[in-house]
Image: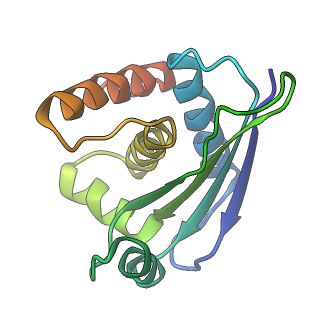
């Protein structure tokens, strides 16, 4: 099974190198693996900054503030065998990820991986609106983080 992960850099504040691209690709793949998602999948990930994610958050969620990550699920289980499942789009503010990593006392890489995992779970239909749903999502996030080698 070969997933297609499209990475786009739409910001200039945080360098996007091959290591970060590889980490994000692995984060998507490991999350799908930890969820036993058996179809080939397509996911688009865009790296942006606080200003641009603020605009998107306001436009699509009606929330007039920057955020760390946005998920735009488009997964539809009405597809033919052999087709890739187009799961949706992820937008990550690397500027916000860097600030949160500093705030939480862990690496930028761990934060970027966490945000990617969190967002892929949203693409798969998870949410955290109710306490029991939030706890379930936390459990699944931890499983994927562990697969990536981030224990904390």
Residue at 41% from the left image edge and 48% from the top image edge: 115
Outermost residue, right direction?
A: 82
Left or right? Give the position of 51 relative to 44.
left
- Toward which corner of the image does residue 8 lie, by quadrant? bottom right
Residue nearer the viewer, 100 or 15: 100
- 6 left or right of 33? right
Relative to 149, residue 51 above or below = below
The quarter of the image holding the N terminus is top right
- Which quadrant of the figure has residue 51? bottom left
Q: How is the image coloured?
A: rainbow
| Residue 152 seen in the current view | no
Instruction: Please tell me which residue is depicted at 51% across the width and 19% down the height of the picture.
Output: 35
For residue 63, say whether it is visible. yes
Considering every residue shown, the one lying at the far left of the view is 131
Query: Which residue is painted at 40% across and 52% down in the image?
Result: 108
Q: The C terminus is located in which quarter?
A: top left
Q: Residue at x 41, y 59 (%)?
A: 69
User: Vertical placement of 141 versus 42: above or below?
Assistant: above
- Which residue of the protein is positioned furthest toward the front in this rendering? 78
Rendering coords of residue 90 (x, y %): 54, 56
Up-down relation of residue 100 to residue 144 (above or below): below
Residue 38: x and y in percent read 68, 17
């Amino acid at each position: 099974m070969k997933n297609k992960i499209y990475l786009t850099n739409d910001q200039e504040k945080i360098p996007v190198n091959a290591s970060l691209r590889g980490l994000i690709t692995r984060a998507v793949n490991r999350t799908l693996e930890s969820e036993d998602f058996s179809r080939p999948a397509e996911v688009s990930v865009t790296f942006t900054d606080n200003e641009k994610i603020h605009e998107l958050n306001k436009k699509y969620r009606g929330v007039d503030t920057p955020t760390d990550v946005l998920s735009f699920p488009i997964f539809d289980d009405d597809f033919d065998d052999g087709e890739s499942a187009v799961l949706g789009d992820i937008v990550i503010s690397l500027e916000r990820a860097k600030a949160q990593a500093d705030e939480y006392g862990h690496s930028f890489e761990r934060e970027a991986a966490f945000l990617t995992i969190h967002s892929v779970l949203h693409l798969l239909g998870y949410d955290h609106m109710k306490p029991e749903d939030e706890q379930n999502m936390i459990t699944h996030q931890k499983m994927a983080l562990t697969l990536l080698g981030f224990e904390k």
